[in-house]
Amino acid sequence: MSTAPGAGPDERAARPGPRGTAFLLSQVGAHAAARFAERISELGVIPADVGLLRMIATRPGRSQQSLAEEMGVVPSRVVALVDSLERKGLVERRRNPQDRRNHALHLTEEGTRVMKEMRRLGSAHEDDICAALDRAQRARLAELLEAIAAQQGLTPGVHPGYR
Amino acid sequence: MSTAPGAGPDERAARPGPRGTAFLLSQVGAHAAARFAERISELGVIPADVGLLRMIATRPGRSQQSLAEEMGVVPSRVVALVDSLERKGLVERRRNPQDRRNHALHLTEEGTRVMKEMRRLGSAHEDDICAALDRAQRARLAELLEAIAAQQGLTPGVHPGYR
DNA sequence: TATTGTTATACTCTATAACTATA
DNA sequence: TATAGTTATAGAGTATAACAATA
């Protein structure tokens, strides 16, 4: 892949316009996501797990339905994700005595430990991805991205890739 | 999804740190990709098709192997993509008389027309995604993203999502 | 009758590996 | 024997819809 076939001047002239900012966003974003997935694989979790864990950590005891709603996914998808996290011993389902229909979700001790590890990996990931930028440029980039996210109606902390 | 369960002050205090720039990149990038996919669906193509069409337009007559190499995907994947583009009448495979093993790929007239439409949609997409930013801010953003892309070793115009 | 969670099923995407035809 | 392309197959991921338990 590093041996890209050489493009002569003729081919360059035929190029369909410059790569736009939106394409760059998508390209760099996908790269960042892939690198993050690589990193956390050492913890035995996938990106979708991270969002779920964070939401449970933020508000312990919440139901699967509320997670599905916030993530914008179908409830049966949450079942699969929670199944896998429970198998790994990171979360547990507790029957709610008041309403035995729903499962209150909680992190286990191991889950809390993994969350801590994830934050550490997240920092390293941040430094890796932004290695080309100094502190001021990173702040500037975050500012621009936040402006786009807000205008586009993205929910803070909710990744569209969940759905 | 818009009815996010209210988070009180306690929950906010429990939040596992601020969302980082890398997360924002991935979040906004995935959003941009999804919106673009929506847009081009009216042309009957998917994002992976766009890269393929552009590469064929840039250098007509190239082989499927060379595309696979540049995209970083397996040859059989290119078969499926070219099959679908051929069924839609956007590209054609031409036997190379010199070496009848490989297929020279060319855009059809319809394929050229669709490429033109795609550029139009691309501009509209760009304006949509960057609506929050003025011209100077867009340039600034592109500059920062290009610095990251270069430092991370991304090939210009090649989306990691192809693989 | 409505709601929470679960299962069963099917569909899409993609990779691996075997295969055909040319060289 | 090597190469371009293809097909067959299997696996992962995800959505839909039917279902069971509880309210």
Image (cartoon, coloured by chain):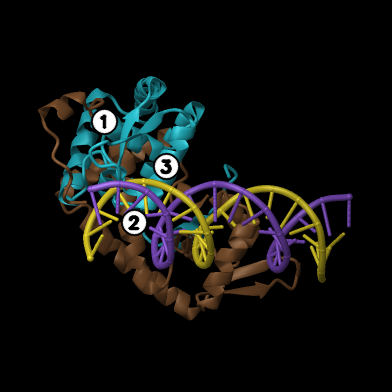
Chain colours: A cyan, B brown, C yellow, D purple
Dot 2, how many residues are within 10 Å of its Cα: few (below 14), some (14-19), or many (20+)? Answer: some
Classify mark 3: helix, strand or loop. Answer: helix
Classify mark 2: helix, strand or loop. Answer: helix
User: Image point 38% across, 31% down: which residue?
Assistant: A92
- Asked whether A54 or A37 is in front, the reply is A54
Q: Are marks 3 and 1 on the same chain?
A: yes
Above or below, A117 relative to B74: above
**Badge nearest the viewer, 2 or 3:** 3
User: Image point 62% across, 73% down: which residue?
Assistant: B93
Q: Is residue B160 visible?
A: yes
Chain holding disc 3: A
Position in image of residue B144 (x %, y %): 29, 37
Give, as a three-letter code, the residue at label 2.
Ala
How far apart are the alpha carbons under marks 2 and 1? 31 Å
Chain holding disc 1: A
Give, as a three-letter code, the residue at label 3.
Leu
Residue A126 found in image quarter: top left
Dot 1, how many residues are within 10 Å of its Cα: few (below 14), some (14-19), or many (20+)? Answer: some
Position in image of residue A26 (x %, y %): 36, 49
Q: Mark 1 points at which residue?
A: A60
Q: Mark 2 points at which residue?
A: B34
Position in image of residue B133 (x %, y %): 16, 48
- Asked whether A73 or B118 is in front, the reply is A73
Classify mark 1: helix, strand or loop. Answer: loop
How far apart are the alpha carbons under marks 2 and 3? 22 Å
Q: Can residue A5 be seen in this view?
A: no
Q: Are marks 2 and 1 on the same chain?
A: no
Left or right: where B71 falls relative to A99? right
